[in-house]
Amino acid sequence: MSLTEHLASGAATTAYCWVVARKDGVTIGVTDHDEDVVVEGVTCSSATGMVTTKFEQSLGLVEDDLEIEGVIDDDQITVADMRAGKFDDADVKLYLVNWQDPTEFFLFPVGKFGKITEGDGGAFRVEFLSRSHDLQQPVGRTFQRNCDTKLGEAPCGIDLTLPAYRTTTTVQTVVGSTVTVLSLSGYDNGWFTFGSINVDGQIIGIRRHDGLVLELRREPDVPIEFGASITVTAGCRQDAETCRLKFNNITNFQGFHLIPGNDRLTDYPVRGQDDYDGGSLFK
């Protein structure tokens, strides 16, 4: 019997199953059934108490809408992993399964993990993004003065794994969003401003670097303990001056810092002032 025939029988024994493939290679299965269900070789655990709260599909390129709610009570899905971003952009498959015969199933085209909202008592809500979401993202480049490439990406050319741009140090104190470390010797003051720290997979941006003090962009989601080892990575203001002076990398600068600004639209020649001969404005 096919799943369609099973549903038409009027005595359907179905459940939703989600299979999540994280970017770190970990695959997790969960279900809203009260017992584990094995679908396509993946065991979907019932321990998380998942419930589908919204599910809409549309024809064409309109973005589909799917949300689930659950309570984190399973080692597979933890608050620490969610806050550390381990589920970000994970691939998701949603199945409607006959739990009496899991070989009978229907696979919905879903997509990727989206926004995760935490509630009280370990509850959470997850939004899933369909494949059409990717088609709605901006394509191409924007002509702007600042660089449109992140430090360390391929067009930038800077290798952030080199000791000149990354170091490991030890946490001394954490007060709110301010972290004091044991040592950052060999690095100029402000070198790590706009960079990031990485502690056990939790990556947080650095707003300001002053001596041994790192002011983070937000408080750590997972508390950072005294003596913890963290990796600190350099940051970039993404302007031409920083690229040239700090990184000696102006040849790879991905901005357009020489394009005239809006002030040139209202500029006009004045006899005896400047040199309006049609030549370069940046000699």
Image: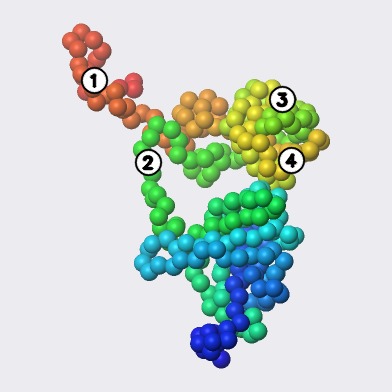
Instruction: Compute the Cα span from label 4 to label 1.
Output: 54 Å
Instruction: Compute the Cα span from label 3 to label 1.
Output: 47 Å
Instruction: Compute the Cα span from label 2 to label 1.
Output: 24 Å
Q: Where is residue 229 in the image (x, y as percent from the top left)?
A: 77, 39
Instruction: Compute the Cα span from label 3 to label 4.
Output: 19 Å
- Residue of label 2: 142
Q: In which quarter of the image is the C terminus?
A: top left
In the rendered view, how is the structure colored? rainbow
Of circles 2 and 4, which is in front?
4
Q: Which dot marks residue 223?
A: 4
Q: Where is residue 15 in the image (x, y as percent from the top left)?
A: 61, 75
Q: Position of residue 208 (x, y in %)?
A: 61, 27
- Residue of label 3: 212
Of circles 3 and 4, which is in front?
4
Residues at discs 3 and 4 in contact (Cβ within 8 Å): no
Q: Which residue lies furthest to the right in this view?
A: 227
- Residue of label 1: 267
Specify which label sits upstream in the sequence, 4 or 1.
Answer: 4
Q: Position of residue 213 (x, y in %)?
A: 70, 26
Instruction: Compute the Cα span from label 2 to label 3.
Output: 37 Å
Q: Residue at x 34, y 22 (%)?
A: 282
Specify which label sits upstream in the sequence, 2 or 4.
Answer: 2
Secondary structure, mark 1, is loop
Q: Quadrant of the N terminus?
A: bottom right
